[in-house]
Amino acid sequence: MSPIESLYYAVGELAYVVASVDGQIKEVERKKFHDIVAAELKHDEYY
């Protein structure tokens, strides 16, 4: 698996865990999750 595929897989796993806690991802959780992932991708260490 390439580094970017590993990243996508891990992001999917995290989203699943967040949703499995209460059955859905709330808007506040979705926004925070997005912000964290976007901030990390700005480092350009995954390409």
Image: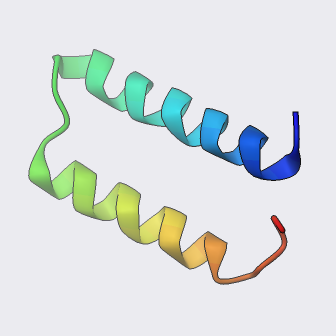
Picture quadrant where residue 47 is located: bottom right
Q: Is residue 33 above or below residue 22?
A: below
Q: Nearer the viewer, residue 45 or 36?
A: 45
Q: Position of residue 12 (x, y in %)?
A: 50, 33
Q: Is residue 27 above or below residue 37?
A: above
Q: Nearer the viewer, residue 42 or 29?
A: 42
Total marks shown come to: 0
| Left or right: 8 in relation to 14 | right
Q: Position of residue 3 (x, y in %)?
A: 85, 49
Residue at position x 63%, y 71% in the image:
40
Residue at position x 28%, y 26% in the image:
19
Residue at position x 11%, y 52% in the image:
27
Residue at position x 24%, y 50% in the image:
29
| Left or right: 21 in relation to 41 | left
In the displayed orientation, state which residue is furthest to the left. 27
Q: Position of residue 21 (x, y in %)?
A: 28, 19
Colouring style: rainbow
Q: Is residue 38 above or below residue 9?
A: below
| Left or right: 33 in relation to 10 | left
If the image is split into quadrants, where does the N terminus sit? top right
Picture quadrant where residue 31 is located: bottom left
Q: Position of residue 18 (x, y in %)?
A: 35, 31
